[in-house]
Image (tube, coloured by chain):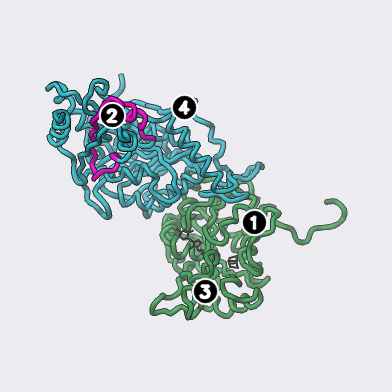
Chain colours: A cyan, B green
Amino acid sequence: MAEIVLIKGNEAAGKAAIMAGCTHYYGYPITPQNEIPEYMSLHLPEAGGTFIQAESETSSINMMFGSAAAGMRTMTSTSGPGYSLMLEGLSHFAAAELPCVLVLVSRGGPGGGSLESTQLDYFSVTKGGAHGGYRNIVLAPMDVQEFFDHTQMAFDLADKYRMVAVVLTEATLGNMAKPIEIKRVHAVPSEELPAKDWVMRGKAGKKKKLIVGGAAPGFGSFNDLNELNRHLADKYRTVALNETRYEAIEIEEADVVVVAFGITAGGVKQSLIQLNQEGYRAGMIRPITLFPFPTEIIRKTSERVKKFLVVEGNMGQMVEDVQFAVGDKAEVSFLGKAEGLISLEEIYSAIRSLCEKG
Amino acid sequence: MNDGRRAVVQRPQSLEPLATHYCPGCGHGTAHKLVAQAIDELDLQEIAIGCAPVGCSAIMPRYFDVDMILGPHGRAPAVATGFKRALPEKIVFCYQGDGDMAAIGTAEIIHAAARGENITCFLINNAIYGMTGGQMAPTTLIDQVTTTTPLGRVKERAGSPLRMSEILATVDEAAYVERVSVDNPKNIRKAQKAVKKAFQYQMENRGFSMVEILSPCPTGWRMSPTDSRAWLVENLMEVFPLGLLKDKWEEQAT
Ligand SMILES: Cc1ncc(C[n+]2csc(CCOP(=O)(O)OP(=O)(O)O)c2C)c(N)n1
Ligand code: SF4
């Protein structure tokens, strides 16, 4: 039997990282994710790894760049303002095709924002965020168990595709304690992970290796940026084909389909139970990966279902991706809030009134 | 070759047999050679990892025949930290311009020193931003004309030059800090010793070492290669005096 422990989301992420073989963690304090560096500062050295409290998030991400070049499983965690400081580094990770795991525990924004739970970072995380038009793999856990599982999975996905894998969650989930099952999960079986033949070890009699956050003739693996960008686009297409994850609940018979992610989806799930008991026919598509986005299932569903509701902890970001998937085949409504959780009553009423509307 | 001839001067093995893109009279070529020579002499080519800057020498991964990482502008000491902490048996060095280290990268270099990272850093101080076309650097001298101080650097508006070696020498965990110059053969020989010593300190796990190299940028300074050497001696050395600023191990020995 697997071990069950009561644990805070943030600590679960730290524990998951160590179980997944993370050996190098770099971070800078920022609420609401401080339990992650605190956990790592004690437990990672115990496990033989390295913890550094960096002088800034800019430095955290660049320390990771060095450790990733050496082939280590490396992670950082942060919240909005820190994530913004990491963007330059993340763009270089994308260009150099180095694996990176980043846990982003969202708070209020823009700017300094607040410590409230929000989903305001959807755009920045799923559309690349920094310069140069790259992509991150983005996992969006709904509860503490998934936060624990997704953190482990992120290491496999980052290694397999040599990409940045972000676990995007919210202040509430980071600070919520729940009993979870402590088990090792994989997004890719270890034996199927490609060998890290690009890892830097010193020339050692062989041809020198270059790890470059860009491209230039005779420099790194690509002759020019066009070649690099074409390669990256191919890779992102492969990721979309292989790694799109979602949960579909009661969509076959539904009159209304809700699209929500993360902790908001948890609220929707609860409301759906009640609504279904009351005879309303509503379902949900919950993107588990925000990139790649489950466009196809939403598109297919919109051929039959004519009413969609997007619920997000922001003023409307994922709704654009849903609208794109649906086109003019169905109507897309929106319920959102950029500060604090959306209440169950608000979610319940929004779905019900859509069901009742002709 | 065993034909009775003996090589008097040779390209260091750790440099590729390539012509560089550096301007005539540029100090980067000499600085590259010093670093490569030290790598050869200490037999480090197989285990050396270089962290390149963003600046004119961003192209150095092409010229060096050692493994190299090129990250963002100013972040080399953080990248080097991450690599060295992952594989401490490798010899990790940073090579940075003055804009790279003393402007955008001040936090990274100072905190790498503060943590006493066992890495070796080289600062190529040419008192200007070469790559972007000759703008003011944090090391630009008062009254020095650059493309963003067209009437000369005015203290009241643009501040005074920053002395990285002096700053780093105040950091407790910095083990070795020295300023050298590549303006003439005598100074180049001194520089060679300092560069080698900086690597040796890392090999002996003595902690953070930094060598600042005063280096001419004839293009940025709008001078001939010969005049730029004279200008370096007369002006740059006044503000950035050569010499040993810190040797923690020697201090402890005495
Ligand atoms: C974040 C960022 N800002 C600005 C630049 C543009 N940039 C490239 S090199 C450079 C300055 C280089 O000067 P220095 O470090 O003194 O090196 P030099 O070229 O003189 O050797 C700047 C500002 C950049 N590449 N990245
Ligand atoms: S601009 Fe200056 S630093 Fe750059 S290559 Fe030319 S001389 Fe050297």
Residue closest to the eye, A216 or B46: A216
Question: Residue A92: x and y, percent?
Answer: 47, 48
- 3D distance between C-alphas at marks 3 and 4: 55 Å
Disc 3, disc 4: CB below 8 Å?
no
* Disc 1: which residue: B36
Helix, strand or loop at label 4? It is: helix
Q: Nearer the viewer, mark 3 or mark 2?
A: 2
Residue type, numbered disc 4: Ser
* Disc 3: which residue: B240
Residue type, numbered disc 2: Ile
Figure check: A311 above or below B133 = above
A52 horizontally vs A143: left or right? right
B245 horizontally vs A331: left or right? right
Residue closest to the eye, B194 or A79: A79
Q: Nearer the viewer, mark 1 or mark 4?
A: 4
- 3D distance between C-alphas at marks 2 and 1: 58 Å
Q: Are marks 3 and 2 on the same chain?
A: no
Q: Are marks 2 and 4 on the same chain?
A: yes
Say which chain tag 2 marks: A
* Disc 4: which residue: A190
Q: Which residues are magenta?
A: A292-319
